[in-house]
Image: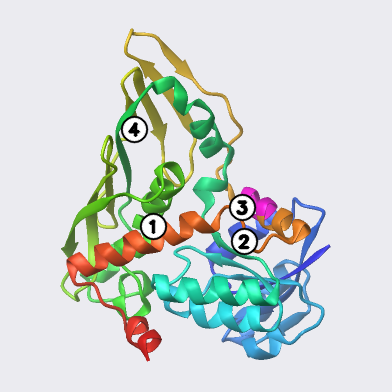
Amino acid sequence: MVRLATIGTNFITDWLMEGVQELDDIQLAAVYSRSMEKGREFAAKYGVEKVYDNYEEMAQDPEIDAVYVASPTYMHYTHSITMINYGKHVLCEKPVCSNRTELDLLIQAAEEKGVVFMEAMKNVHSPGFQAVLDHLYKLGDIRRATIQYCQYSSRYDKFKNGIIENAFNPKLSNGALMDIGSYCIHFLAALFGAPKKILSDSIFLSNGVDGAGSIIASYGSRQAELIYSKITDSKLPTQIQGENGCMIIEECPIIKKITIQYRNGNSEELKFEWRDNPMIYETKDFIQLIREQKTDHRFLEASRIEMDITDEVRRQNGIVFPADKIREQ
């Protein structure tokens, strides 16, 4: 039984707990929140008594095996490295870090401590993504892909009224690239690996945060276009185009439907399990890695590539976070 603690008490942690409650080999053991009141309220929903408002104290609890980190992005490194140093396995919410330097330090520390560190990137752990991989050969030579996630943020109206919440605060390593662009970038990394070069552009809002952006990734014989936005909606699907046909994928973060339209006019709808809340799948993979004691596991490479692409996009667009300077010291 994996005894899990959580850092963060927002809606994303509730989503993870929905999956945890369906599994027999993991249970919630403790909750951390800066606010004891919020921590107790969250813990009470799941029948948990242990609540901490000091994450270092929680890291030293011998009755905790693993920690789910769902704090703001700029705190992912601090919370994760603390848990790892005390021998806890860590499932860290996306984007895994502010930059590649932080990620390398976390992977190295996890390897030295013999614990599992994994990014919680729900799309690539889903049966839908596995279906993409399993049927990709049917497209023939892959030439183009368009991966997109554009969703008008529920917090954008507040932003336009002068209320800046975490999602639009670059000081917290946030913005469209980090918040939802990461889904597209990680999808690409897990699908095709590292590109030879990228070209990117961003739309910036009044406080300097990026509200939307696009990336062209070149692989020589194929090209991928990534489109992401927190200030507009899109109804267009993700597409992978090959010489024999086109794979149409509905919703990049939660893959719900996949259809292959063949060049000869035939079509095929792929069958796979999907859920509105797919976080059970990443939790299962995390538990399996802990069981197998795999610290150098297959999911790390996509996280590395994700951070490399993200760092380069930020370099090209002048996106700088306070966390960058802290890690340079």
Residue found 33% across the figure and 51% down from its top: 151
Dot 1 falls on a residue whose secondary structure is helix
Give the amino acid at mark 1: Ser
**Viewer-nearest of discs 2 and 3:** 2
Circle 2 sits on which residue?
296
In primary-sequence order, the first of circles 2 and 3 is 3
Q: Residue at x 18, y 66 (%)?
A: 317
Q: Secondary structure at mark 2?
A: loop
From what the image shows, is residue 86 above or below residue 147? below
Distance from disc 1 to disc 2, alpha carbons, whole Å, reads 22 Å
Q: Nearer the viewer, residue 314 or 29?
A: 314
Q: Are marks 1 and 2 in contact (CB under 8 Å)?
A: no
The answer to whether 210 is drawn above or below residue 193 in the figure is: below
Q: Nearer the viewer, residue 135 or 297?
A: 297
Position in image of residue 137 (x %, y %)? 46, 24
* Quadrant in the rendering for residue 11: bottom right
Q: Earlier in the sequence, mark 1 or mark 3?
A: 1
Residue 57 in percent (x, y) is at: 69, 90
Labelled disc at residue 282: 3
For badge 3, the amino acid type reads Glu
The stretch in magenta equals 280-285
Residue depicted at 70% across the width and 83% down the height: 86
Quadrant hosting residue 147:
top left
Is there a contact, CB below 8 Å, between mark 1 and mark 3? no
Q: Are marks 4 and 3 in contact (CB under 8 Å)?
A: no
**Which residue is disc 1 drawn over?**
182
Q: Which mark is residue 226?
A: none
